[in-house]
Amino acid sequence: MEPSAGAMEDQPVPERRGAAWWRRDPLAYLSAEFDGTRDVWRSASGRLCVAGPEAAREVMGNRRGMFVETSDFFHTRSGVFGPRAAQVDIGRGARALMRRRLDAGRAGLPRLVRDRLVPVSDWPDAGNLLVREHLADVLLRPDAAAPLRQAVDGVVDRAVLAGARGRHSAVSRLLFRRRVMRVLAAEIRTRRAARADDPRDLLDVVVTGGGPSARPDDLAEVYLSFLFATVGSLGFALGWAVYLVGTHPGTERAQPEWIVREAMRLWPVAWLFTRKPSDAHDLGNVTVGPHDDVDVCSYLVHRHPLHWDRPDEFVPCRWAAPPPDPAFMPFGYGPHSCAGATVTMALLEDLVRVITHDWRLSVTAAGSGPQLGPALAPPRFTARLSDHIDAPGGR
Ligand code: HEM
């Protein structure tokens, strides 16, 4: 397994086992424990780990109702935002809004890329900021008040960008979070009172779908989940695609769809899902119970040697003939799989098409491992776009 950044010196696994290592770098920990064959095992950290695609689908799909029904997206500090009907409404509303924006904005992507990425850009932030700019009106409608806009921009700078959390003290993060929650909750109350029918941004989607009895603080947290999914996850996924193409010459000629899929296979931004069993039962020959934390690791599923040929290599053309039952779940699996998956893929493919077809890309990277947080962000790298295809003397 390819190691994650920073924690893979040549020590044998048993000496490094333990909860502390798990907390410091769970990806390195899981990679070191995985022996390349097993699907489910009880880790030395005490947790249950799942790397086999069938077992992963059993947990995430939850057809037998053996796990507490939930998804990370709707988790709030007070529990799980609900009811389920509101979750589904919100997911649908967000997808529809995104789709409208992508259709209306597609023609502007070449210009956005030229203005923001040419000739040199610093990643992964460049990807996050590009997505934020393209989706600006989806995140907040143009007439949003300045304090609201500043609060949302502040969340991006202080919590969404890779490594941003480490740049502020715990106290400063706490105070900032309180301020943001106050601003968002006040706006949610105002919009709820105004009863707008047609959602114009994701905050409207959350207010309308959440219904009149939802707590403003919970709605604010759901809105923040959208901010992390769009500017964060989508931006990181773009970063991985650009990084991998730029460090694997020749792959820029592959179809954008294959590039995006292969990038998401190698480095799934959402790489770990934790679920709780509701009853004791067997999962891949291991007994699990309500006291267990079951970690489904899509990073390991996507590199399982029994399911992938050359699992650690970036091979976009493998997607020319996708496997019939792929060990692939970048957007989760089952009832809670990502409501934004299709629009996300569409935007990523559009952007990768512009970057690889219109420009010559070269990448200089500071390292090769991921920046590990709740999402798997690419390493810091610089991208150069040159020789526009239409320019005299260009390709
Ligand atoms: C690269 C970008 C993205 C990735 C990798 C991603 C990944 C995921 C994953 C893995 C889940 C399932 C979580 C779980 O089962 O615990 C999920 C759920 C969800 N995602 Fe995304 N997502 C992305 C972008 C988006 C966008 C742009 C939107 C909004 C339009 C979105 C909306 C949602 C919603 C609403 C859910 C909850 C679904 C449910 O519980 O019914 N996601 N996402």
Image: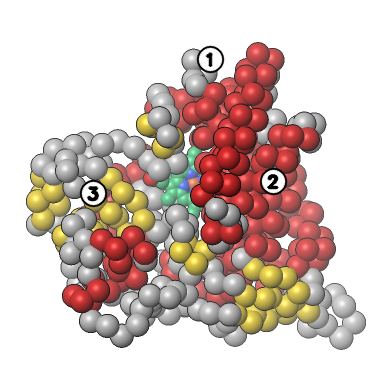
- How far apart marks 1 and 3 lie (CA) works out to 34 Å
Label 3: state its secondary structure. loop
Q: In screen coordinates, is 226 left or right of 142? A: left
Q: Which mark is residue 212?
A: 1
Name the image quarter holding the C terminus.
bottom right
Q: Earlier in the sequence, mark 2 or mark 3?
A: 2
CA distance for labels 2 and 3: 34 Å
Q: How far from the left and from the top, in percent, is residue 145? A: 77, 31
The amino acid on which the numbered mark 1 sits, given as a three-letter code, is Pro
- The residue indicated by pointer 3 is 293
Q: Residue at x 31, y 49 (%)?
A: 274
Residue at 35 percent of width and 82 percent of height: 9
Asked whether the beta carbons under mark 1 and mark 3 sit within 8 Å of each other, the answer is no
Which of discs 1 and 3 lies nearer the camera? The answer is: 3
Q: Nearer the viewer, mark 2 or mark 1?
A: 2
Q: Which mark is residue 153?
A: 2
Q: Residue furthest right?
A: 392
> How many angstroms separate mark 2 from mark 1 (CA)?
27 Å
Disc 3 CB within 8 Å of nearest ligand 1 atom: no
Give the secondary structure at mark 1.
Answer: loop
Question: Residue at position x 73%, y 78% from top?
Answer: 384
Asked if 291 appears above or below 320 in the picture, the reply is above
Q: What amino acid is labelled 2 in the image? A: Asp
Of residues 123 and 249, the one nearer the viewer is 123
Q: Residues within 10 Å of mark 2 (few under 14, many from 20)?
A: some
